[in-house]
């Protein structure tokens, strides 16, 4: 890849896609985005042109990808809602990959998740595995990046954990909280993704940070960092989900799903490989504790409203 090559990023106005775009631009690369929200404010100005990510029109989608050497795909859904399901997300991604092939794209860099499996009973992890299979079978060169628990300034999960710790008298941890998580910073994910495009081989790699915690330790570390006095209680998963849904009614959002609880408790957000992210979660907390969780970030507002 050289600086004259065009890179297309799905969702450059979102979260992971924004950081991948920033990394590409800082490296002097040319970037275009295809997005489900092309009319949103463009944080990159005239550096990045936005085109619709319209899965119902494969021909136009291929035209929007034309001229690109590399496609960075961050498209996915966190949970099923209305017509947006894990099944439709898989089919939509297949449409995107086929359009990329028709457009002459040479490599797909795909953001997946650690421990995907077609045998999983969790739609998120099974869907991610099915997408990986489709990319591998497409005939395009590929780099598949499997991050663990991604955190950063615009993050939904870590920010909202801090928000609830600031606002509520108690915080529910499902089960014993001893299952492991291995947070990785979104800038590290972007760097690994962009660097992977330089490879001439097809690659699959986990993307993980340098620190591992139990989930209970993670919650308590956040609470201590922001000075929260909230009581942290270990509750059965079903009761945790009940309280999460109550909180969801208050904030008009989906706070936590049963599948996310099951994925956490199954230890799917850790890797047995060496860390390749450099950002320390504990140090990042120290640097951002004053602002973390000051306002709630709505998943519904970001993607569905």
Image (cartoon, grey):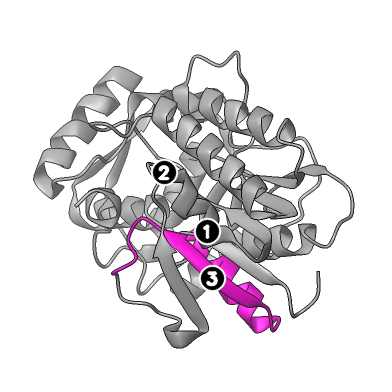
Would residue 101 appear left or right of 83 to someone viewing this image?
A: right
Q: For marks 1 and 3, give the one nearer the viewer.
A: 1
Helix, strand or loop for disc 1 = helix
Residues packed near mark 1 inside 10 Å, few (<14), some (14 to 19) or many (20 plus): some
Is any part of residue 13 visible from this angle? no
- Whichever of labels 2 and 1 marks the residue nearer the N terminus, that label is 2
Q: Which residue is mark 2?
A: 55
Measure how far apart labels 3 and 2 are at the Cα level.
17 Å
Displayed quadrant of residue 159: bottom left
Residues packed near mark 2 inside 10 Å, few (<14), some (14 to 19) or many (20 plus): some
Q: Which residues are magenta?
A: 13-39
Helix, strand or loop for disc 2 = loop
Residue 276: % across, % down: 76, 55
Q: Nearer the viewer, residue 195 or 48?
A: 48
Helix, strand or loop for disc 3 = strand
Q: Which residue is mark 1?
A: 63
| As drawn, 66 above or below 127 | below
Q: Nearer the viewer, residue 71 or 160?
A: 71
Residue 32: % across, % down: 54, 70
Measure how far apart labels 2 and 1 are at the Cα level.
12 Å
Q: Residue at x 36, y 74 (%)?
A: 290
Q: Is there CB contact under 8 Å for labels 2 and 1?
A: no
Measure how far apart labels 1 and 3 are at the Cα level.
12 Å
Is any part of residue 23 visible from this angle? yes
Q: For marks 2 and 1, give the one nearer the viewer.
A: 1
| As drawn, 15 above or below 252 | below
Quadrant, the N terminus: bottom right
Q: Residue at x 77, y 63 (%)?
A: 195
Q: What's the mark number on residue 32?
A: 3
Q: Nearer the viewer, residue 5 or 223?
A: 5
């Amino acid at each position: 890849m050289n600086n004259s090559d065009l890179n297309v990023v799905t969702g450059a106005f979102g979260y992971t896609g924004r950081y991948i775009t920033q990394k590409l631009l800082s490296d002097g690369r040319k970037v275009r985005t295809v997005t489900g929200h092309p009319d949103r404010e463009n944080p990159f100005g005239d550096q990045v042109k936005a085109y619709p990510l319209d899965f119902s029109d494969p021909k136009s989608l291929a035209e929007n990808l034309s001229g690109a050497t590399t496609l960075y795909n961050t498209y996915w859904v966190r949970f099923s809602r209305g017509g947006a399901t894990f099944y439709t997300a898989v089919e939509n991604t297949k449409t995107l990959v086929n359009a990329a092939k028709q457009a002459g794209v040479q490599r797909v860099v795909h953001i997946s998740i650690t421990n995907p499996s077609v045998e999983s009973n969790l739609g998120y992890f099974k869907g991610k595995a099915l997408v990986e299979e489709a990319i591998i079978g497409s005939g395009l060169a590929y780099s598949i990046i499997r991050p663990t628990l991604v955190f950063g300034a615009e993050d939904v999960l870590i920010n909202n954990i801090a928000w609830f710790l600031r606002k509520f008298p108690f915080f529910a941890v499902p089960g014993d909280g001893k299952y492991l998580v291995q947070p990785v910073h979104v800038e590290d994910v972007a760097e690994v993704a962009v660097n992977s495009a330089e490879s001439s081989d097809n690659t699959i790699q986990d993307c993980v940070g340098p620190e591992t915690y139990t989930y209970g330790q993670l919650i308590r570390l956040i609470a201590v960092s922001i000075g929260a006095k909230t009581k942290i209680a270990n509750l059965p998963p079903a009761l945790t989900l009940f309280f999460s849904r109550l909180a969801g009614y208050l904030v008009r959002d989906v706070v936590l799903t049963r599948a996310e609880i099951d994925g956490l408790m199954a230890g799917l957000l850790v890797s047995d490989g060496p860390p390749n992210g450099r950002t320390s979660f504990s140090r990042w907390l120290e640097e951002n504790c004053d602002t973390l969780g000051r306002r709630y970030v709505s998943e519904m507002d970001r993607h569905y409203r």
